[in-house]
Image: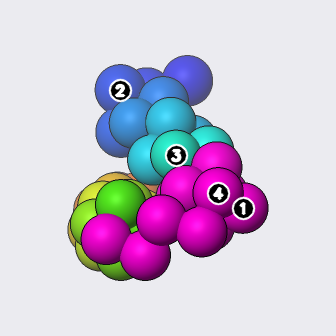
Amino acid sequence: MSKNEQRFQKAFLLQMRATFRGNPNQAGRARQMVNYYRKKLEEKN
């Protein structure tokens, strides 16, 4: 598992947690990270 994959999973978990807690700022930031790493992973494959 690559570093980017690990970061993607961590960001994804952060996003889910922030969303469930109803923290829109953190959820939005986490969503940006998720999208960023998803793009990076797609470029590699």
Q: Is residue 35 above or below residue 44?
A: below
Q: Which residues are magenta?
A: 15-25
Front residue of 38 and 10: 10
Kind of residue at badge 4: Arg
Mark nearest the camera among 2 and 1 is 1
Mark nearest the camera among 3 and 2 is 3
Q: Identify which residue is drawn at 55% across, 24% down.
A: 1
Mark nearest the camera among 1 and 3 is 1
Contact between labelled residues 4 and 1, with CB atoms less than 8 Å apart? yes
Residue 14 is marked as: 3
Precedes in sequence: disc 3 or disc 4? 3
- Marks 2 and 1, how far apart in space? 26 Å
Q: Which residue is mark 1?
A: 20
Kind of residue at badge 2: Lys
Residue 23, percent from left and from top: 48, 65
Task: Examine the structure image and report whether residue 11 is included in the region drawn in magenta.
Answer: no
Q: Secondary structure at mark 3?
A: helix
Contact between labelled residues 4 and 2, with CB atoms less than 8 Å apart? no
Front residue of 1 and 20: 20
Say few, some or many: other residues with alpha carbon within 10 Å of mark 4 (under 14 / 14 to 19 / 20 or more).
few
Residue most toward the front?
Answer: 22
Q: Identify which residue is drawn at 52% across, 46% down.
A: 14
Corner quadrant of residue 33: bottom left
Residue 21 is marked as: 4
Q: Identify which residue is drawn at 55% across, 56% down.
A: 18
Residue 45 visible from this viewpoint: no
